[in-house]
Amino acid sequence: DVMKEVFDIRQMEIELQQKLDLAEVHIVPGNSDEFSWVKKEMGRTCIALMKKKLFAKGNTIAVTGGTTIAAVAEMMIPDVDLKEALFVPARGGLGEQVENQANTICATMARKAMGSYRLLHVPDQLSKDAYESLINEPSVKQILELIRSANVVIHGIGEAQTMAERRNSSQEVLEKLENANATAEAFGYYFDQSGDIIHKVLTIGLQLEDLKGIPHIIAVAGGASKANAIKAYMKYGTNQVLVTDEGAAKAILKKT
Ligand code: G3H
């Protein structure tokens, strides 16, 4: 029964919004752990929301990496408003493969929207010294200012261990995460189940505290396997909008 399904989803959106204390929750049917089209549906929903959040002029949209935000980019189509927008990667290299990097996704999204973009060219493994000198480079400083001035941020949320392994983190980092019961990952930061930061990848770009000054933040994350990660990250409490799927929503609300 389609009407009942729509009603159930709407009901879950309200419950989830209250449980996670968010401004808005949007749930697409299905479980993205099982079907990849569900990720694309989250992408489509995210794009529709993103367009609603734009200023009349001068929009800067910062995007993170990951397969979910890659699906948002994949669903992008040319748009009158977005073609005036500037797309930037939220943070520098986090150890991901090219297709999952924020730079790649940012360029794809901008190209599809027919907007413009700027990239952050930073190596993945930054020493403290390299980091200090890079952030003082005039060209890097300029793009960092653009990133911090973003009015919309689109980001993924990952399951901590999955992310750490996918990024080939060192044994030392893996142990640190395990000992601290790492649950969630977003923007290269790792969180425990209370939403406290337990580790951060050293790279330039948006720092979590910068999110406080950004008016529209849209998290896109689904799949039952991410239920605990979504719950943990949302305790950090900076998000306004969550786009997720039925799989994650049911698991968070314990309806399975
Ligand atoms: O940056 C990675 C995200 O936090 C999660 O990645 O969308 O591939 O699960 P994903």
Image (tube, rainbow, N blue to C red):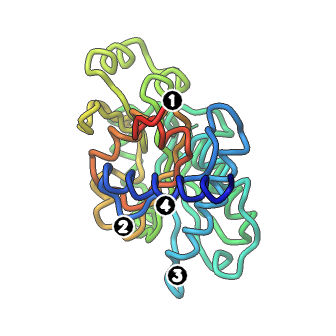
**Badge 1: how crowded within 10 Å, few (<14), some, or many (20+)?**
some
CA distance for labels 3 and 2: 14 Å
Residue to which mark 3 is pinned: 58
Judged left or right of residue 240, residue 81 is right
Q: What residue type is labelled 3?
A: Gly
Residue to which mark 4 is pinned: 139
Q: Which of 99 and 162 is in front in this view?
A: 162
Give the SS element for disc 3. Answer: loop
Q: Quadrant of residue 32?
A: top right
| Residue 246 at x, y percent in the picture | 55, 44
Which of the two marks, 2 or 1, is nearer to us in this view? 1
Residue to which mark 2 is pinned: 214
Marks 2/1 in contact by CB < 8 Å: the verdict is no
Residue occupying the point 34% across, 51% down: 207
Judged left or right of residue 106, residue 13 is left
Give the SS element for disc 4. Answer: helix
CA distance for labels 3 and 1: 37 Å
Q: Quadrant of residue 230?
A: top left
| Residue 100 at x, y percent in the picture | 63, 39
Sooner in the amino-acid sequence: mark 4 or mark 3: 3
Give the SS element for disc 1. Answer: helix
Sooner in the amino-acid sequence: mark 3 or mark 2: 3
Q: Which of 13 and 205 is in front in this view?
A: 13
Sooner in the amino-acid sequence: mark 1 or mark 4: 4
Q: Is mark 3 within 8 Å of ligand 1?
A: no
Q: Which amino acid does label 1 sit on?
A: Ser
Sooner in the amino-acid sequence: mark 3 or mark 1: 3
Sooner in the amino-acid sequence: mark 2 or mark 1: 2
Residue to which mark 1 is pinned: 225
**Badge 4: how crowded within 10 Å, few (<14), some, or many (20+)?**
few
Sooner in the amino-acid sequence: mark 2 or mark 4: 4
